[in-house]
Image (spheres, helix red, strand yellow):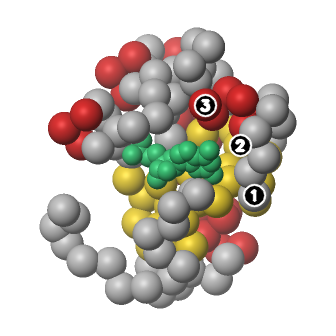
Amino acid sequence: MSDDLFLKIIAREIPADIVYENDDVLAFRDVNPQAPLHVLIIPKAHIRTINDMRAEDTELFGKLFLAASEIAAEHGVAKDGYRVVMNCNSAAGQTVFHVHLHLLGGRELGWPPG
Ligand code: DGP
């Protein structure tokens, strides 16, 4: 857990541009944005990857998507469209081992992703 960078953001030990917060969820702008709107939406609980998700986390993961839809609406990308993606482990490009939903919007997004 001590290597969990995002826990440090939750604890305000590392600064971040926070755009959304409630009791269970925090969202902040990605430090290396890949779109005009690129927000990371994370649970405050320490969960390393999707593989570590348990049945009792189902509601919490749902809250990440609910946050995504609210943030997208607030930032004006809901109508045109946006993407949410969660990378799992190294082959998918996960580099921070605290689950996070990427919210990308504000430009045309190609498919399939690289
Ligand atoms: P992933 O590759 O799916 O694990 O995405 C990790 C993302 O986290 C990556 O897009 C860059 C972002 N990131 C890494 N360190 C920091 C940080 O200290 N602050 C912020 N805001 N974002 C970070």
Amino acid type, residue under disc 2 in the picture:
Leu
Q: Which mark is residue 17?
A: 1
State the SS at label 1. Answer: loop
Q: CA distance from mark 1 to mark 2?
A: 11 Å
In depth, the one of 58 and 51 nearer the eye is 51
Residue corresponding to mark 3? 5
The residue to which callout 2 is attached is 26
Q: Is mark 1 within 8 Å of ligand 1?
A: yes
Residue occupying the point 36% across, 85% down: 108
Q: Is the CB atom of the residue marked by disc 3 within 8 angstroms of ligand 1's nearest atom?
A: yes
Q: Is residue 34 toward the left or the right of residue 37 in the image?
A: left
Report the residue at 44% width, 69% height from top.
Answer: 34
Q: Quadrant of residue 2?
A: top right
Q: Is residue 39 above or below residue 47?
A: below
Image quadrant where one finds the N terminus:
top right
Q: Position of residue 112 (x, y in %)?
A: 16, 67
Q: Are marks 1 and 3 in contact (CB under 8 Å)?
A: no
Of circles 1 and 2, the one toward us is 1
Nearest the eye: 95 or 113: 95
Q: Residue at x 66, y 64 (%)?
A: 71
**Which one is earlier in the sequence, the residue at label 1 or at label 3?**
3
Q: Relative to 16, does residue 70 appear above or below in the rendering?
A: below
The quadrant of the rendering that contains the C terminus is bottom left
Label 2 CB-ligand 1 distance < 8 A: no
